Image: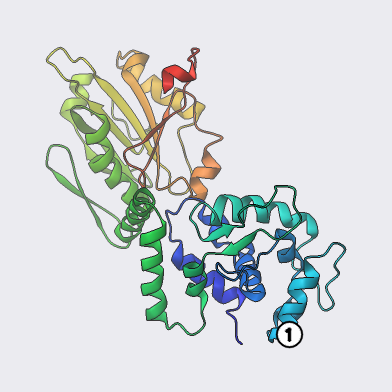
Amino acid sequence: MRLATVVEIQERLMIVFPDGTAQRNYLTREMAARTVFVCLYAGAIEGNDCWIRPNQVCRMTDAQAARTDTASRETWCRDSARGGFTPPVGTPWFADTTREPIRDETIGEGFLPVRAMIERPGIATTSSKGRYALEASFSALFSPALSSEEFASAAATWRASHLNKAALARQALVARGALVGQGQVTVRFPNGETRTLASGPSSAIAKAVIEEFAPRFLRQAHVLWLSESGNKLVARDEQLAATLGIRIDVSRALPDLILVDLGDDAEGQGFLVVFVEFVASDGPINALRRDALTVIATDAGFASESLAFLTAFSDRSSPQFKKSMAEIAWGSFVWLVSEPAHLIHLRAEGQVLLSQLS
């Protein structure tokens, strides 16, 4: 009986769990594909009453994986679950110590939350018995008999039934951003004007910040300044800048976008200047950047209470987000294209109780 190879399984995992899926790395990396393979090899599938231990993934070898006859699979499944097992052929895929990331990350934070795997009921935490198996409909996605079209349809059906609406919406927004990046990007400003940006991930983030973030989190948003990579000017409101006393000098360390919230009454209650950086590769608002931007505003006579600093990313599973979080300035905000209704605030100072936040 032919089983899907580890390479084939990983290719399908990348499709089953598209960009925007929470913990996508845990769900699609090679370790995840090897875990699925071992479940298939051992027959650890819902309804079979057969379960694996994480260290059995470690103990599989390429030579053993090639032996797909029923007798070889049954013998390996029985023997590999025993203590002190040494693979009869080949080199183990992982050291036994690697069982913890398989158990805690790939299975615990990846497959179990999305119900791609199930856990054996009624088994003690300290038990050495196998406890994990593939959910039946998830395991069916890796049948070599499925054509590309059949697999794509089955994967879409599985996602719709197993991933919650928020997760599906997140994936759709990330996918939309990726599609936007394939051609010129038209951005509609709050006043109804439009501008065209060059293709690219930064432009997709810019469009989302102006069209999604601004109306959600600002009262009367206005674009004061917008640039593309290389300080290429896209939009600049000289009249408003002059009124506010903000000097728009392209030689200075200006951000990607400056938004102005005109507030909610004639006296300017709620007035705010928002400095925004789009992070598609690097360059979040760190402490030095925040201080430099603060100088621009204070030179114009604004108090720090009238300033806000925002770093925008496509998604929190992106490498750029993970890389940049350690640098982002306290007191600033983070917004994600894929989760537009949420805002992260890196609170800078002042004691606050969790009960107050909730």
Q: Badge 1 is on which residue?
A: 71
> Nearest the camera: 280 or 146?
146
Which residue is located at x 77 percent, y 65 percent? 81
Q: Percent position (x, y) of residue 25?
A: 55, 56
Residue 67 appears in the figure: no
Residue 133's place in the image compared with 187, above or below, is below
Foreground residue, 214 or 56? 56
Residue 65, percent across and down?
70, 79
Residue 302 location in percent, x, y?
A: 31, 14
Task: Judge left or right: residue 5 versus residue 209.
Answer: right
Mark count: 1
- In the image, taking residue 141 as reference, residue 181 lies left or right, namely left
User: In x, y percent, where is residue 162?
Assistant: 42, 58
Q: Which residue is drawn at 15% across and 27% down?
A: 239
Which residue is located at x 37 percent, y 15 percent?
304
Q: Which residue is drawn at 18% across and 41% down?
A: 189
* Dot 1: element: helix
In terms of depth relative to the viewer, which is nearer, 54 or 16? 54
Q: Which amino acid does label 1 sit on?
A: Ala
Figure quadrant of the C terminus: top left
Indicate the quadrant where residue 256 lies. top left
* Quadrant into which the N terminus falls: bottom right
**Label 1, residues with CA under 10 Å away: few <14, some 14-19, many ≥20:** few
Inspect this view and state whether residue 304 appears. yes
Residue 8: quadrant of the picture: bottom right
Q: Is residue 104 left or right of residue 176?
A: right
